[in-house]
Every structure is written in C-alpha cells, then in structure tokens.
Image (tube, helix red, strand yellow):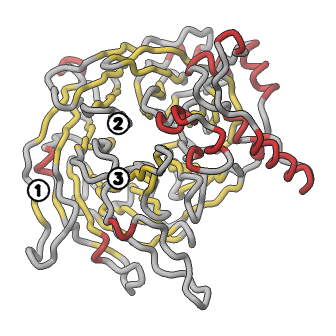
Amino acid sequence: MAASATAAEEEYAPRLQKRTLKGHRGQVLCLAHSSERRAHYASTSDGDVRQRHHPSLLLSGSEDGTARLWDLRTRRTAICMALPSTEEDTEVTAVGFHPSISEERLVDAEQSDTDGNLLPIQNDCTVYASTSNKVYGFDLRYHSTTSTAPILKEPHFDLSPSFGCTDEINQISFSYPKRNDGSGMYLVSAADDSGDVHIAESLPHRYDPQSANATIQATQKHKILQHAAPETVAIVSTATFQPRTNTDAYIATGGTDCTIKLWDASRPRKPTCTVQIKPAETENTTQLCNPPYVHSLSWSPSGKLLCAGIGDGSISILRAEGRRLNEVGRLGLDEGGHGYAVAGVCFPAFGLCGQDPIANQLSAKVRKSGEAEDRLAVSAGNDGLIIFWDLGGNMVGSGPLDPAKYLERCLSPPENEAEANDAAKAMASMDLSNDDSPEDLVPSPPKVLFRINHRHKPNWMTSSRISDAALPNSLFVADTTNNVSVYTLPL
C-alpha cells in the first residue's frame, strides 16, 4: 500500500469544467461521439495525415427506450429516436455513428447566421442503435432538427437479420477503412450475451424515400466469432476493431470468461491469439475476491496498445505485435488505481498531432503512426472514480508524448496571465520529438495524473477531439443517473 500512498501524494488537483446533459428519463447506458471514429483522412503536402470528422454531435442510449442526438453547442437534444421494443425489452444498449459522411459535409459547419443565431446542426449522418438482440439504423438526413416534433418513431433500416444475434447486444463497433479517403467497405460487429460476436458487411446507411415507404430489411450474410465456449456460459462484454491495420481487419473481444482474444475478421473460425486474464497480484481483499472479468476494451490511437478494464479493479495493458497480444503491464490499487471493478476504459485521443505548435515539434514518423497520445489512458470504476493515467515510457516506449506536457494547464493552472503566456511560449519551444537514445532515457513508470470523484457507477465513456467546435477535448460519461456528464480539459 506504500506505492498507493506515494502516488496519491504526487497527484495533481485537476482544473476542469463540468457540464451536464439532461433529457433522458432512464439510466444512460451507452454513448458515441461523432469524431471518435476518425473515419476520414486527408494527406497534406508534407506527408502528414490530418483527420476529418463529423460536426460536434453526441449520441446516447438509455433505459427509457430512446437514443438521443445531442447538439453540443446548446447541450440540448436535437433528435430523439424511439426504438421498436416490447414491454420486456426497452433498453437501448449500444449506439454508433456510421463512419461515412458525404464529401460536401467534411468541413466544419457554420455556427451562426448573420444575425448571430445558431444554425440548425448539419445532421448528415446515419446512426445505429440496438435494443435486445435487434439493430436499427436511422438516416438523419431526412429529419429536420428544427421540426416541431423532433422525434423519430420508425427506423429507416432493420439490420437485425444481417447480424443474427440471439441475445442482448452489448456493443456495436465499426472497422476502420482500408483507404484513406474513407470510401472503403466497413465491417460492423455486435457483441452479445450469448458469448458470440456477429460481424456484418456492407450494411445500408443511405435511405431512399422513393424506393420504399417502410423500414428496409437488410438480409446480408454475417460471420460469427465464438468468443466463449458453450460450457462456460460466458457473455461477450466488449468487442472493438483495431485501428491503423494495413490489410486485414482485426478485432479484440473480451468477456466474463476472463479472456481477451484477437481475431482476424476474415478468418472467424478461431482467434489469432488468446490472453487469459489472471487475478491481480495484490494483498487487497476486494481485488482478490472479484473475478477478473473483462468489462471494457479500448485501442490506443496508434492501434499498438489495448487497454482492458477488469472486474477485480485492475487495468490490463496489452501490446499488439502482429497477430498476437502480449500483456505489458497491470495497474491496480497498489499503483493508485481503483478499489472496485473497472467498468470503462478509453484512450481519449484528443488529436493533438493536428494542432500547432505541437504538430510542428513532432517527427513525421510519430505524426503518421498516431502514437503521440498513446501514453494517456482514462479508467472509470464502480468506486465512482475516474482516473487519468500516464502509462509511462517504460511500458509504451519513447515515442508517445509525456501527457504532463500537454495537460500542463489542467494539472498546474497558471496564477496570472503573464504566467499563462510564459507557459504557451514554453510549449511552442518544447522538444517533443522523443528521439533520445536509449542511454538518455529517464525511467518512466506508470502513474496516476489525477482523479475525478464522479460519485456514480459508470456505464460508458467517450471523448471529443481538440478540433471540436463546441466542446473540445472533453470526456463524456454515462452512469447510473439519467444524465450525461461532460468534463472539459483546458489543453
């Protein structure tokens, strides 16, 4: 416990701005931000890769049977989608934005008209939502956000036959495009309580009102990844595609059988790698008593690291090496972590590589690999704490940035304007290339940067990018209340 005490003494008091999104009438179970997929890329003349995405939108699903699209400029519901349901099955358990958007909407939307009034959001997107073992799609181009009745009661697509799920769906995930212009084919996965992950391809996402007046039934064949052996009666809690793979689509899955598996989606018969998660090595009685179920998975921006939230209160960090996963670290209570199960993990991926002055200080290799932000991870536990971690150079290597460099304003706020200007100048002149030789590297173990006492058990986390026009570099948290909490970091 000495290590935990030392970590607590070195933590910073975070300087954050908290907001609350209110509207749901039941517990919020899942979230998706329109920029989290980073589906569209544009190559600049210097060979850098800059990422483009949807406008500032948030999608949420709730126990009240609805999915809501939020206009984050006003922090109000823009569109409410009521999913078909029965009296027994009403919860919306998974949501997601389809990665494709039209070329004319790639640029950021104008925020206001000539009189200063906010313009309607450009809802040129298709969203997917699931309830029970069903998946539905809504093409939001055909619904005005200024309508007097901003409620969609009929989905445009019934995608359930394309997945063939037999039990409640826990997560929807999209693969990353093989082409940088975002025009490639996408795979979509649905992880369910049966212990399987169902993968569909070429799902419809554009509704033609001239071709049909009713919901379109999608009937393409699907593949099944059998994560859990039938005798284990385990569920698949989470499944997420690996970003930045050159050829094949790889997907990581985790569940209550205490395993993490890596799959080549084109070869669904067996995983390429299986990692058995063992109980954390600690004297803490809570972690010893709780089984190491895998509740949540998140890939780092580079796709080189995988973070797993474990039921015993620990966090497992794995490195992807080709078709295999190797566990490189475990963060538990002894490292200053959680005392109860870790329900959610994420790599925020604020998109700092596309922002000056940081972008100008990074090497071309680091910019293209996306590994600059691989050291910053966030975990949310059933103890009501949200923890920001520096994974450290010892664990992830010398390429990623030290998070303390770009979280400086959050960790140690300047006392006056002059000090703030000096900090900005220091950042502009800071050497971020990380090209030190192994002999020059200083030992850098993982550590807690700061904690947020959220007070509620979390259900889901996602984040926005620094380029977001409404709520940049923010963490969105769904929990056991009817609201969504938003924590904005002053980067």
The relative height of residue 440 versus residue 137 in the rendered view (above or below) is above
Secondary element under disc 2, as helix, strand or loop, is strand
Residue at x 48%, y 19% (from the top left corner): 290
> Whole-percent x and y of residue 446?
65, 21
Q: Earlier in the sequence, mark 1 or mark 2?
A: 1
- Badge 1: residue crowd in 10 Å (few <14, some 14–19, many ≥20): some
Q: Quadrant of residue 149?
A: bottom left
**Amino acid tagged 3:** Val
**Amino acid tagged 2:** Thr
Distance of mark 1 from mark 2, alpha carbons? Answer: 22 Å
Tag 3 and tag 2, C-beta contact below 8 Å: no
Distance of mark 3 from mark 2, alpha carbons? Answer: 13 Å
Residue at x 30%, y 57% (from the top left corner): 100
Front position among marks 3 and 2: 2
Q: Which mark is residue 218?
A: 1
Q: Earlier in the sequence, mark 3 or mark 1?
A: 3
Asked whether the viewer can see residue 162, the reply is yes
Q: Which mark is residue 240?
A: 2
Q: Quadrant of residue 13?
A: top right
How many tags in the picture? Answer: 3
Q: Which mark is residue 343?
A: none
Distance of mark 3 from mark 1, alpha carbons? Answer: 18 Å
Query: Hey, which residue is sitting farthest front in the picture?
Result: 45
Secondary element under disc 3, as helix, strand or loop, is strand
Query: Hey, which residue is sitting farthest bottom in the picture?
Result: 115
> Whole-percent x and y of residue 81?
33, 67
Q: Quadrant of residue 150?
A: bottom left
Residue at x 38%, y 18% (from the top left corner): 321
The answer to whether residue 184 is left or right of residue 470 is: left
- Which residue carries the number 3 mark? 95
